[in-house]
Amino acid sequence: MATADTCTHEDASLAENGYLDDGTIECGLHLARFEAATGKALSYPAEVDLTTYAVKVENGDVFVDVAS
Ligand code: FES
């Protein structure tokens, strides 16, 4: 599973402002936390889960299904 990059609290890139630690993504702006495996919002001020995308690996290549 892959997640969207944008925090659901405000328009902030989690890749640029966030931290991944022990399976949890923390937004660096206002410290909302999300479960990395599911995108589930774990703490205020995020109230909406991250969008998630299916991922598969074939012959060493990683494919992320962003169309569905
Ligand atoms: S923008 Fe991510 S917690 Fe506010």
Image: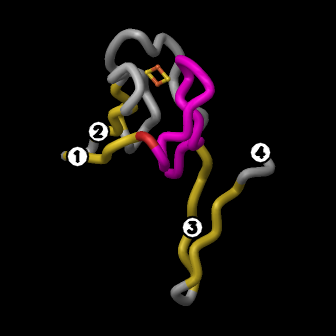
- Range of magenta residues: 1-16
The residues bearing labels 4 and 1 have C-alpha atoms spaced at a distance of 28 Å
What residue would you read off at disc 4? 68
What residue would you read off at disc 2? 24
Structural crowding at the residue carrying mark 3, measured as other residues with C-alpha within 10 Å and reported as few (<14), some (14–19) or many (≥20)? few
The amino acid marked with disc number 1 is Asp
Q: Earlier in the sequence, mark 3 or mark 2?
A: 2
What residue would you read off at disc 3? 56
- Left or right position of 47 against 36: right
The residues bearing labels 3 and 4 have C-alpha atoms spaced at a distance of 14 Å
* Image point (26%, 45%), residue name: 23
Q: Earlier in the sequence, mark 3 or mark 4?
A: 3
What residue would you read off at disc 1? 21
- Left or right position of 43 against 7: left
Q: Nearer the viewer, mark 3 or mark 2?
A: 2
Name the image quarter holding residue 52.
top right
The amino acid marked with disc number 3 is Lys
The image quadrant where one finds the C terminus is top right
Is ligand 1 less than 8 Å from the beta carbon at label 2?
A: no
Q: Earlier in the sequence, mark 3 or mark 1?
A: 1
* Image point (80%, 50%), residue name: 67
The residues bearing labels 3 and 2 have C-alpha atoms spaced at a distance of 21 Å
Structural crowding at the residue carrying mark 2, measured as other residues with C-alpha within 10 Å and reported as few (<14), some (14–19) or many (≥20)? some
